[in-house]
Amino acid sequence: MASEPRSVTPGRLEPMLPVLLPVVKRRRETGDTVTLALDPGPEGFGFAPGQFNMLTVLGLGEVPISISGDPGDRSRLVHTIRAVGPVTRALCRLTPGATVGVRGPYGTPWPVAGQTGRDILIIAGGLGLAPLRPALCQVLARRREFGAVEVIYGARRPEDLLYREELSRWRGRFDVRVHVTVDAAGADWRGPVGVVTTLIPHARFDPPYTSAFICGPGVMMRFTVGDLLARGVPEERIFVSLERNMQCGLGLCGHCQLGPLFVCKDGPVFSYARVKEWLTLREI
Amino acid sequence: MTRLEPLLAEHPFCRDLAPGQISRLAACARERQFAADEVLAREGEEIREFFLIRSGRVALEIFTARRGPLLIQTREAGDFLGWLGLEPHALWVVDARALEVTRVLILPLPCLNQLLEEDPILGYQLLKRFTQGLARHFASMKRQVVNLLHGL
Ligand SMILES: Cc1cc2nc3c(=O)[nH]c(=O)nc-3n(C[C@H](O)[C@H](O)[C@H](O)COP(=O)(O)OP(=O)(O)OC[C@H]3O[C@@H](n4cnc5c(N)ncnc54)[C@H](O)[C@@H]3O)c2cc1C
Ligand code: FES
């Protein structure tokens, strides 16, 4: 029986009060997406893969953003942000030296530790690779504990692929297989073109002994969950990360409610078995 | 048994066909290897062959004057490329180009169509498999359109 991800409570005494952290590195990932590394100071910043922070741009507002760095490295706090509205656009414009308000980490993690002995499937669509990158880092750091490790990643176009360097580094390893697809490409692309589920038949895993971590847009997660269930991956070992509008991030305001659950506190990572009652597949 | 029979039998499109059906298909089939960038089919040309992809990867492309070829979907090992049941002299609506060294079994349509007319049981089996594959290709295509129009 797989255990449900549990929320890891924030360590700070005043959970509503952001701390200001300086940007130390900015990397442009794609046309509209940027990765910012913040310096959390000498104590470092501990988090579990899949957790998020509330990031504030002073005078503009606060948004939930997943932590996308390596949980084994406490000295850098990394977020990958896509510019979609006022706050995320402002975050994407920040350069080294600017400061960001940070409170967190919040939410439930990908339960990597509970999957010893299983095959691991990590399936990401678009920006969904950001919250899954820490999970993959943790899986690779504990590689001996797992069976096959397969990463399936889909983006809109080749130029929308995140973390290109890491992708090729992971691809170069013999103990993990990385499958990448895009929805459309030019003539110089040599990889598959199609949706992520078209790659699932090419991944090597033993469904009853597999745990799957999935993050991406709703439609992508819906079809991926459906496909894995049909192949016999148990629903309690299919984990999804859900996005809802958030305000407090602490289970207080009710903005992110899903049935009796608060996505900010009980999630964002849930087993499909836990949320399916509140979420028909159509609504993921 | 000819050399092509085991190759046909192990391809998902022919899996679980009776040995007699496999040998009738093998009588039509030939084998071919395409180098990277070699073209299997070109838009506007008559569809004369049905391809079973054994290994490699094939790009389906639409050529645009302004942006060159646009890659719209790929076909991988285990998949098929082509059409069954179309009117005679139907034309390819995409270019198909090998993206890497690609090995295929080719079933020329005149021979294949004659076989399917003469053997309706085999014809039904192959059309069923063709329809299932087509449904898969269309499902993927529809979601690609959603991703491209509404963001992924
Ligand atoms: C748990 C969690 C983790 C997240 N992790 C990341 C991350 O790692 N990187 C990242 O870039 N974004 C992430 N998001 C989404 C991010 O929080 C929103 O994009 C952000 O709140 C938008 O704020 P804004 O002021 O820039 O734009 P707004 O003006 O608030 O929104 C602009 C547009 O984006 C849409 N939008 C807003 N929030 C969301 C959302 N949650 N999902 C989908 N569409 C939305 C709005 O409907 C609107 O169309 C996460 C959200 C949650 C709940
Ligand atoms: S964001 Fe306030 S309860 Fe979840």
Image (cartoon, rainbow, N blue to C red):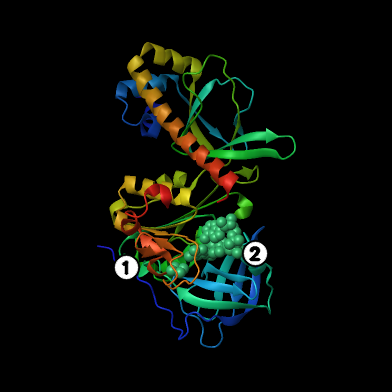
Q: Which picture quadrant has residue A61?
A: bottom right
Q: Which residue is mark 2?
A: A86
Task: Say what amino acid the circle numbered 2 marks.
Answer: Pro
Does residue B51 appear left or right of residue A273 in this picture? Answer: right
Q: Which residue is mark 1?
A: A114
Q: Nearer the viewer, residue A265 or A68?
A: A265
Within 10 angstroms of label 1, few (less than 14), some, or many (20 or more) residues?
A: some
Q: CA distance from mark 1 to mark 2?
A: 38 Å
Marks 1, 2: nearer the viewer? 2
Q: Quadrant of the N terminus of chain A?
A: bottom left
Q: Tell me if the residue at label 2 has its CB under 8 Å from ligand 1.
A: yes
The picture places residue A98, in percent across and down from the top left corner, at: 67, 78
Residue B11 in view:
no
| Disc nearer the start of the sequence (1/2) | 2
Let me know if marks 1 and 2 both belong to one chain: yes
The picture places residue A211, in percent across and down from the top left corner, at: 34, 58
Q: Which picture quadrant has residue B89?
A: top right
Residue at 66 percent of width and 68 percent of height: A90
